[in-house]
Amino acid sequence: MLEAIFAPQSVAVLGASPEPARLGHRVLKNIIDHGYQGRIYPIHPRATEVLGLRAYPSVLDVPDPIDLAVIVIPPQHVNAAVDECGRKGIRGLVVITAGFKEVGGAGRELERELLATVRRYGMRMIGPNSLGIIDTISQLNASFANAMPLPGNIALMSQSGAICTAILDWSYQQGIGFSRFVSLGNKADVDEVALLEAWNRDEHSKVILAYLEAIDDGPGFIRVAREVTKCTPVVAIKSGTTAAGTRAASSHTGSLAGSETAYEAAFAQSGILRARTMNELFDLALVFAYQPMIRGNRVAIVTNAGGPGIIATDAVERSGLAMAEFTPETIRRLQEKLPPNANFFNPIDVIGDATPDRYAWAIEAALADPNVDGLIVLFTPQAVSDPLVTARLIADLTKQSNKPVVTSFMGGASLVEAVRALNEAHIPNYLFPERAVQSLAAMYRQSLWQQRPAPTYRHFDVDRDRVAQLFAEVRAAGRVELGEVEAREVMEAYGMRLPKSRLAHTPEEAVAIANEFGYPVVMKISSPDILHKSDIGGVRVGLSDATAVRDAFELIEYRARKYVPSARIWGILVQEMVRKGREVLVGVSRDPQFGPLIAVGMGGIYVEVLKDVAFRLAPLSVEEVREQIRSIRAYPLLRGVRGEPPADIAAIEETVLRVSQLVTDFPEIVEMDINPLVVHHEGEGAIVLDARIILN
Amino acid sequence: MLEAIFAPQSVAVLGASPEPARLGHRVLKNIIDHGYQGRIYPIHPRATEVLGLRAYPSVLDVPDPIDLAVIVIPPQHVNAAVDECGRKGIRGLVVITAGFKEVGGAGRELERELLATVRRYGMRMIGPNSLGIIDTISQLNASFANAMPLPGNIALMSQSGAICTAILDWSYQQGIGFSRFVSLGNKADVDEVALLEAWNRDEHSKVILAYLEAIDDGPGFIRVAREVTKCTPVVAIKSGTTAAGTRAASSHTGSLAGSETAYEAAFAQSGILRARTMNELFDLALVFAYQPMIRGNRVAIVTNAGGPGIIATDAVERSGLAMAEFTPETIRRLQEKLPPNANFFNPIDVIGDATPDRYAWAIEAALADPNVDGLIVLFTPQAVSDPLVTARLIADLTKQSNKPVVTSFMGGASLVEAVRALNEAHIPNYLFPERAVQSLAAMYRQSLWQQRPAPTYRHFDVDRDRVAQLFAEVRAAGRVELGEVEAREVMEAYGMRLPKSRLAHTPEEAVAIANEFGYPVVMKISSPDILHKSDIGGVRVGLSDATAVRDAFELIEYRARKYVPSARIWGILVQEMVRKGREVLVGVSRDPQFGPLIAVGMGGIYVEVLKDVAFRLAPLSVEEVREQIRSIRAYPLLRGVRGEPPADIAAIEETVLRVSQLVTDFPEIVEMDINPLVVHHEGEGAIVLDARIILN
């Protein structure tokens, strides 16, 4: 997929000027200079030859077929030129020209027209406003970057051109190579989702890095990312999340950034490793690009000094990794070869006067130990130590290992050569031990993700038509919020349990209903115009006999008429009084990019004061709901504390899954709250006590 | 203080061998080569001259006075040599020799003897097992490091020699300089506390860095650090776990206080900035060493690309800093000089084609704005940008500014020269924007700390003698845990409010007491042998008349005799039933290094399940208690939610302060819990409902 862009047989450069100062000239020169092997056609209105290649006035004048057109002409001419590309049968476009959506106004209109043309011919387009693309596999540098990245197995996409430039510049210095390097620009056509899809199972890329400012197609992103991350780790940085950052993002790309919560949930649910800083992005890139996947969480540390060993051990214990416990065989091997004052347990301390061979013994023993899943080698410059020889030796010893090895050579001036040797040998090296540990920890998280079984989805048999009809009626009445009786009907149609309840229009009717349900009962005003019933005294609980029911009916009716004289009163709801249980909130909001975001938390102050809520995006799998509920801090309260029996967690899970199905079936639900869901003891179910639904 | 070590007039090197391969030779050579201006005396049993200097067999043979002795002789000879140093009147020692406490056994004994000798003569000693010390002010390199650090204004102490070596090596590469550089070794005499004290108000050090593995004298550390940090920022990395982690924890508070809790509290209460990683340690060092202190939290950002601007803006909002809002004057100035498609608001985007002069306009305007407290300049390599010229210009423009300026030049190969220029001009530069932001944020935290008024301590008039007597009685009885009645007396002696309560020995007495207190009452078994009273049904609440009291007395007595036949029963406590309020836990555990650690949290599940507890070390100031209570997540519950009036927070504060006084007066209290403290509405006080005290 997208072969026309990344592996074209022939490339035309529109705007390939003979003027060396022009951007189009630079782009053409990059394609020629960096070893592209296909045919290259400069396109220029007047030139007949550019950089030694025959030039044509239009792609239509080129006698041979063209796969890819790189466009570097003024914005007002782009659409016409792209139309010619379409007529020529060109399949791929890289539009470097700027002046489209990002400048607003007329630019936005230009971009719409351009996209329409692209779609009409079924072409695929990177950009506009892209810095270009670089593919080291097909040796194509279709960009105005000053140089070609080193070849490697890291694929990178960025929504910021400047980040591309900075990364490229930095990567030379570090000796880090890329397979593909894409500046997404305004991503009118090819966006992060299309690229992820194109790079799925790409044999040339061991890790995908993404710098993202906004994701437009949230559900598409999750679907594709979930697939890709099963094979290839994706490490992403997402900027523009906080309030002020979002403002900057809007003025920058003209796109709307999603809320932080939705991104957190999306990344977690699709197996994307989120880097918090640019540093972390590359720390993780290195370990995935260079080292085999870790298979467990047990790491060994080899060091020539105590202090760094402690730092690394602390970091291991904080990170979700564990310090490996060596087999007796390993300890015997270490004791045989290392001096008696060395430490033979983990971390292995080969002592400050360690020569390279002592490192060798320790590394060999650690890697051979079946209790070790990964290795961290620490090195500090000491009087007799030889950093370069030690680095080379680490490279040799670990080449054949199927366990990941990372290093932290701590220092500067005296380690320059050693660090270069490590880079060349593809051993990820970090200035400080903590970063080495964090990188292995991320690798472990990725391995857990890859080992997860396929998600299970439950489909419930529900009365979808009834809900559709109800929503139509609400809309027909000019409302967006459902009344309580309507919300109840929706819940019932989706199989949720509710307290027995019926509308009474007279005190006598109320008493009859209460007699049927059994006492005590609850009574509530039912009116589309009274949302906060308690505020006007419109709710009475614990009514334990006919007299109380009759009194309550008249009191509630009186108050409703007094405090909201204009209210339409449908009657008074008589409801079974639900016995106490643990109260849970299940809420839904709709994220503009990612769709329905389902919140679960313990009711009352846990949600209101402690903000103890876990979010996931719908549709939810059975496993995701399980995780979601267990990630609430107050989860132990559901398991039962102080001898209290556990709550019916299965019933909460089922309720959340039914809500997930409901909001997936009806995208018009923009907000919904079940608050509270009263959860009884294990096996005794959960009852929706109150629900609100708001349509768009 | 410690002048004999850091600024000696003359230095003797014991073990200054003529053999170039010997450590003592290297140390002597370092002192000579790196420009030390005082007199130098090699001491060697046989040599008469070393490295061109006259050598002596013993310090006692040197005709002139000696300030400092650097000792590099075998461990078994050190004590005798130090004794000679004492007799010679030498005031300072740096013992590089290893083989003391760190090897255990006989080494431990040797160190004890050595320390005794040092103390006998009133000398001060660094080491043993130190890498040595370096002081760039007096140009003294009394170490076997391979080179001298660059001069600068960062003071560094490290409990790990290897970390010293690594830092030194790295600092050359980065062009970072130090004022003083100390390897603490086994810190038998001079430890981190003594060094902090020596470096207080040191005009040559703008920041102190500390790599710590353990602090022995916790209270001393806090006292000195609190003083030092008022003038000089101290950035510390703390590695390794404390003994506290392994200590048996029988009470709530004990099990909640992890090993790290005491260090966290100690750093927070003494104004030490804790770096989580080595990276962060140096990120912070640079900004303090190179830039003026920030006076507020409002930062401006200048960038030539949107993406990095977003990253930085996000980081600002997450960090406790705020994006500055420019004055109209600033915006006018920017609009006048920058192209129309630039962003004139914060972050100022000078656009990818920015030449250095555009950066200059933006930087000048931002620094001149009264709403700006600090500036971050971001730079990405672009076609027309000139990194070196831009760097020099930033250096020129900001030289006179009294606002801190940091940069992030993002990239590598093309920025080498520019980054060097920034280093030389003392502009802290960070590879990625987040780190620049975090450094300014740390500076802001430090400025807040420095602006804090002096802490207020309250002293309560209490009956200390009564408590001392009670504790003596408990010990005399061979117990360590106080009974309920005893714990009550302690609380009362320290002025805490308790429910009215009296011990009854017969049902009739119980009824008489209840009649006096008024109904309802609570009754509890009182026995030193029954700690968990509820478990055996030994507590009855809500007893509302004489019959209920009589029944309860007999039932409780029966159960106690039945379930714990061996228990000594003191009687049955009749207690006023306290009306409901918000329940708070006040607990104390004792950290082996730092002493009493006071925990405060909301009672019940907030502590047990949600672990929502804030810790501080006693003695507590009024301000610290205020902060402590406000840092609990559930604090809003004390302020009152859902229309509930606020709780009497002042009463909680006073209770905590009284507890602080109690545990400071009585170090023998190893654990104590007030659980619950029942807190009534504002102005209505708080009552200790139950208390446990355990002595050592």
Image (cartoon, coloured by chain):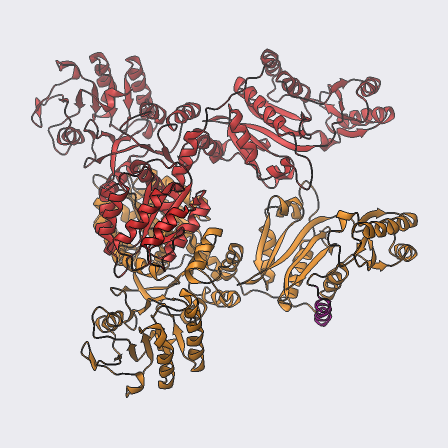
Chain colours: A orange, B red
Coordinates of residue B113 in the picture (x, y in percent) = 31, 18
Q: On the image, which quarter does residue A483 sit in?
A: bottom right
Does the magenta run of residues contain A476?
yes
Coordinates of residue A657 in the picture (x, y in percent) = 64, 62
Along the line of sight, the residue nearer the viewer: B258 or B444: B444
Coordinates of residue A100 in the picture (x, y in percent) = 40, 69
- A631 displayed left or right of A507: left
Residue pictured at 53% horizontal, 25% vertical: B622
Span colored in magenta: A462-479
Does the magenta run of residues contain B112?
no
Coordinates of residue B662 in the picture (x, y in percent) = 56, 19
Q: Is residue A369 visible?
A: no
- B32 displayed left or right of A92: left
Picture layout, residue B529 above or below residue A430: above
Q: On the image, which quarter does residue B231 sit in?
A: top left
Quadrant (top left, top right, bottom left, bottom right) of the C terminus of chain B: top right
Quadrant (top left, top right, bottom left, bottom right) of the N terminus of chain B: top left
